Image (tube, rainbow, N blue to C red):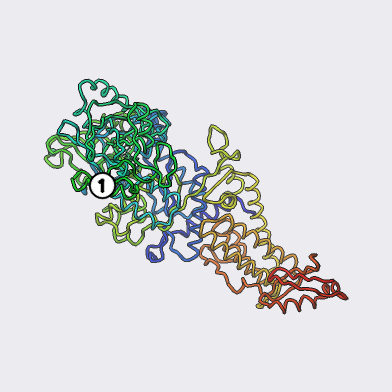
């Protein structure tokens, strides 16, 4: 039977019946935790992106299984979240119904893919048996002081009617719907990821992760070394601190700026300016953070009427408010140095504030303002002539003596805002009591169940707020009437710990058993999209570290090694999208060619970490390749009766070389997720087998069969159903995945005879075979003894012989 979807089904059934991929906990010392980012059950169909993530990673895992690892490869669903709720608002279909239905379909499709997921370990985040533990994680953080509530200006999407985390705002717009994000003051729950900023940054070096991702995290955490310097408010018993990385420019300060939201603003604003200040505060509220920081946006601001005192010169400096200063970074106050800072320069130019140069480039060049580089100080009292690098320390030291400054490290990372005013998420497990305040739900009362019957039209309020039945409860502390928290947790909380639940997914006593989890983790290989660099991947690292500090885990990092798959584009080179009509639907191909052809094409047609445009010809080429193997198998089974020999001759040696070269290349390349080159090598091996079969008169069938068996073993991870079928056809024992991965023999890779070309006066005249380790003299001798060469040089004078080892002999005659 030629390879077809029927063969997929045949083997999928057999694999399931024989529990071929069952993880055996007894072999935990050989465990290899291979994890693909779980999917969001949004559409009802697996798209190319899913396939490209899961197919090749499964092949990698299969290779590891054959290499003797006890592979743990679970799968599950990141099932809470906005899209299901938005869909519900549009269609009236309850998020739970649509989600569970999607999961069912996707699960079936994932099985059809033939990946070796062990479904016994499945995790679905929207089920109470999972979110019970998400709530538990939240409570542990709360009890450790790592979860807190505060009123904060938050990113608000007026269309989704919800708060967004900083990470969910892209270029000032909602990541999900593209609407411009505004600010709103709300009391929200935060997780204190900033407590871990330093460790999160320091450990990045140790991770076997793509450099680009490490860089994104490094920048996102954004460590900045500088100083806080105190300024007094002129004529008032008030002072404030600024954060600066350029204390060397202190003598160039000509004004100071407070963020409009800074609480000092109201206290210092003069009556004459109050009206303008109030207007401006309203205006600033509407700006997104990105806009506020943009260097291209026209600078705006107003004078408060108040002055600050320069900490060294005693000069009076006007205090302004401007939206280019963020309330949430540093101290929310800036000392402005227009001569040396881009934004201050623009601002000062616009509002006619003085610009005072205090740094010059050290090579004395006539540099223009703003000059933002380090250099040598000018007009800076006793610091004049000092280098910026030294002055930025010395000036702080000097101020420190008077208690007016201190060295300070700031991080750009903000605490993680986790409450959402939406329905489809895990309820936040706290109770609000008028007498006792915030009371955590006792652990024995978890889960706080999400009620089914709720009106979830978005109006900015949490839908749960309208559910009397949900909201009213009693205080676990005083027994009085109390209210539940109406907000739900961001889905990123669910996915921040799911990898810990997989290995112990049925535990009803605990989220996981600590001793067991310490054996199963960290994840050895994590595969998923690069878009998660600053969010999921950072949150998961934080949660791991926090749970470690609470004594639940012993490891520091959840994902030792990480790979991002690239993106498969439409045939037109654009991102696949319904509106462009360039979407490739895996099902269409699988029903015709079978799932292995589809998988194999994804692995052969693209560099895994890069992806690229889809090409239908590629899939046909891959299909032909499998047919070619199939014919070879048929041929071998036909001629198998012939006798084989143990020793191998010249012809076999050549094939043997290709065989071991292929084993080595595939092993090394596939290890690095370089599947395309692995498959190229396998194609070459198949060619070599054909060549041997066609060219050699007396074949060593036993040897040939051995090579074919190795070829099938090497192919198995990439075309699991197909090779299982071929393996059976050869009459071998089930399953090919219980076979061990072929090992290469270094000695077979040393070709003991090499063929080299012979040139006479620069023209190629023949080829000779020489021992690969022959000396130049010996090569000359063999060459000159060759019958054909003899004819050419006979009767001529040999002027020179040049030997280029392994390649060429050049003879110069006259
Ligand atoms: C004076 C100065 C002079 C500055 C100069 C820069 C150049 P990073 O490296 O990102 O940490 N700054 C401080 N707090 C701010 C806030 N809340 N909003 C906007 N800007 C703020 O940047 C630190 C620099 O950004 C600080 O150093 C401060 O400007 C500004 F020639 O102070 B600098
Ligand atoms: Zn109470």
Q: Is residue 408 visible to the viewer in this orientation of the structure?
A: yes
In the rendered image, the residue lying farthest to the right is 795
Q: Is residue 641 left or right of residue 609?
A: right
- Residue 224 lies, in percent from the top left, at 33, 46
The residue nearer to you, when weighing 796 against 133, is 796
Residue on which the image places disc 1: 396
Q: Is residue 720 visible to the viewer in this orientation of the structure?
A: no
Residue at disc 1, secondary structure: helix
- Residue 735 lies, in percent from the top left, at 53, 63
Quadrant of image for the C terminus: bottom right
Residue 37 lies, with reference to residue 341, above or below; the image says: below
Image quarter where ligand 2 lies: top left
Residue at x 59%, y 66% (from the top left corner): 710
- Residue 190 lies, in percent from the top left, at 27, 41
The residue nearer to you, when weighing 229 against 796, is 229
Q: Is residue 137 left or right of residue 217?
A: left
Would the CB of label 1 be found within 8 Å of ligand 1?
no
């Amino acid at each position: 039977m030629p390879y077809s979807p029927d063969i997929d089904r045949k083997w999928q059934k057999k694999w399931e019946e024989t529990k071929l991929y069952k993880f055996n906990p007894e072999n935990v010392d050989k465990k290899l935790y291979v994890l693909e980012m779980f999917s969001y059950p949004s559409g009802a169909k697996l798209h190319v992106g899913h396939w490209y993530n899961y197919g090749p990673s499964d092949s990698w895992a299969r290779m590891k299984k054959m290499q003797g690892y006890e592979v743990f490869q679970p799968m599950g669903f990141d099932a809470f979240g906005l899209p299901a709720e938005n869909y519900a608002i549009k269609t009236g279909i309850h998020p739970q119904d649509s989600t569970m239905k999607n999961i069912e379909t996707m699960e079936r499709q994932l099985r059809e893919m033939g990946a070796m997921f062990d479904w016994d370990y499945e995790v679905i985040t929207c089920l109470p048996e999972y979110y019970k533990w998400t709530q538990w994680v939240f409570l542990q953080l709360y009890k450790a002081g790592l979860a807190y509530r505060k009123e904060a200006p938050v990113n608000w999407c007026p269309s989704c009617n919800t708060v967004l985390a900083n990470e969910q705002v892209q270029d000032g717009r909602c990541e999900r719907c593209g609407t411009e994000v505004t600010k709103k003051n709300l009391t929200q729950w935060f997780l204190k990821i900033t407590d871990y900023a330093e460790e999160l940054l320091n450990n990045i070096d140790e991770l076997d992760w793509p450099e680009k991702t490490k860089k994104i995290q490094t920048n996102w955490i954004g460590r900045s070394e500088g100083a806080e310097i105190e300024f007094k408010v002129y004529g008032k018993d008030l002072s404030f601190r600024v954060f600066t990385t350029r204390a060397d420019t202190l003598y160039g300060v000509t004004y100071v700026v407070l963020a409009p939201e800074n609480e000092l603003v109201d206290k210092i604003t003069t009556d004459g300016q109050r009206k303008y200040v109030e207007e401006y505060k309203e205006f600033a509220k509407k700006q997104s953070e990105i806009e506020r920081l943009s260097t291209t946006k026209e600078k705006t601001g107003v004078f408060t009427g108040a002055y600050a005192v320069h900490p060294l010169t005693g000069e009076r400096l006007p205090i302004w408010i401007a939206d280019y200063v963020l309330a949430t970074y540093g101290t929310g106050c800036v000392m402005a140095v227009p001569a040396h800072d881009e934004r201050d320069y623009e601002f000062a130019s616009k509002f006619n504030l003085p610009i005072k140069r205090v740094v010059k480039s050290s090579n004395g060049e006539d540099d223009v303002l703003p000059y933002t580089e380090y250099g040598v100080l000018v007009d800076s009292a006793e610091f004049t002539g000092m280098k910026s690098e030294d002055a930025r320390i010395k000036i702080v030291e000097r101020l420190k003596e008077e208690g007016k400054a201190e060295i300070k490290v700031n991080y750009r990372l903000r605490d993680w805002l986790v409450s959402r005013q939406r329905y489809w998420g895990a309820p936040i497990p706290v109770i609000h009591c008028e007498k006792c305040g915030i009371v955590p739900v006792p652990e024995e009362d978890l889960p706080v169940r999400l009620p089914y019957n709720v009106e979830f039209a978005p109006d900015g309020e949490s839908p749960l707020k309208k559910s009397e039945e949900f909201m009213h409860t009693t205080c676990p502390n005083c027994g009085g009437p109390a209210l539940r928290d109406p907000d739900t947790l961001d889905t990123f909380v669910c996915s921040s710990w799911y990898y810990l639940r997989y290995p112990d997914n049925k535990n009803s006593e605990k989220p996981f058993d600590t001793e067991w989890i310490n054996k199963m983790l960290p994840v050895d290989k994590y595969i998923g999209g690069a878009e998660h660099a600053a969010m999921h991947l950072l949150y998961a690292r934080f949660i791991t570290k926090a749970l470690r500090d609470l004594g639940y885990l012993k490891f520091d990092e959840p994902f030792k090694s990480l790979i991002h798959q690239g993106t498969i584009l439409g045939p037109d080179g654009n991102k696949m999208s319904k509106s462009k009509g360039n979407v490739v639907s895996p099902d269409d191909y699988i029903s015709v060619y079978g799932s292995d052809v589809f998988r194999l094409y994804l692995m052969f047609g693209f560099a895994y970490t890069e992806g690229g445009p889809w090409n239908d010809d590629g899939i046909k080429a891959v299909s032909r390749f499998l047919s070619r193997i199939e014919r070879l198998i048929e041929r071998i089974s036909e001629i198998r009766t012939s006798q084989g020999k143990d020793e191998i001759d010249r012809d076999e040696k050549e094939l043997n070389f290709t065989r071991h070269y292929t084993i080595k290349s595939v092993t090394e390349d596939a290890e690095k997720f370089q599947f395309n080159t692995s498959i190229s090598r396998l194609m070459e091996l198949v060619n070599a087998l054909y060549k041997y079969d066609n060219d050699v008169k007396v074949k060593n069938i036993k040897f040939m069969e051995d090579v074919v068996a190795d070829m099938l073993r090497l192919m198995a991870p990439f075309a699991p159903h197909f090779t299982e079928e071929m393996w059976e056809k050869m009459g071998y024992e089930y399953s090919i995945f219980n076979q061990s991965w072929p090992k290469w023999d270094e000695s077979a890779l040393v070709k003991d005879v090499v063929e080299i070309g012979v040139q006479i006066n620069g023209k190629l005249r023949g080829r000779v075979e020489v021992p690969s380790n022959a000396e130049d003299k010996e090569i000359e001798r063999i060459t000159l003894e060759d019958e054909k060469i003899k004819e050419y040089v006979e009767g001529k004078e040999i002027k020179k012989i040049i030997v280029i080892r392994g390649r060429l002999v050049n003879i110069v005659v006259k």
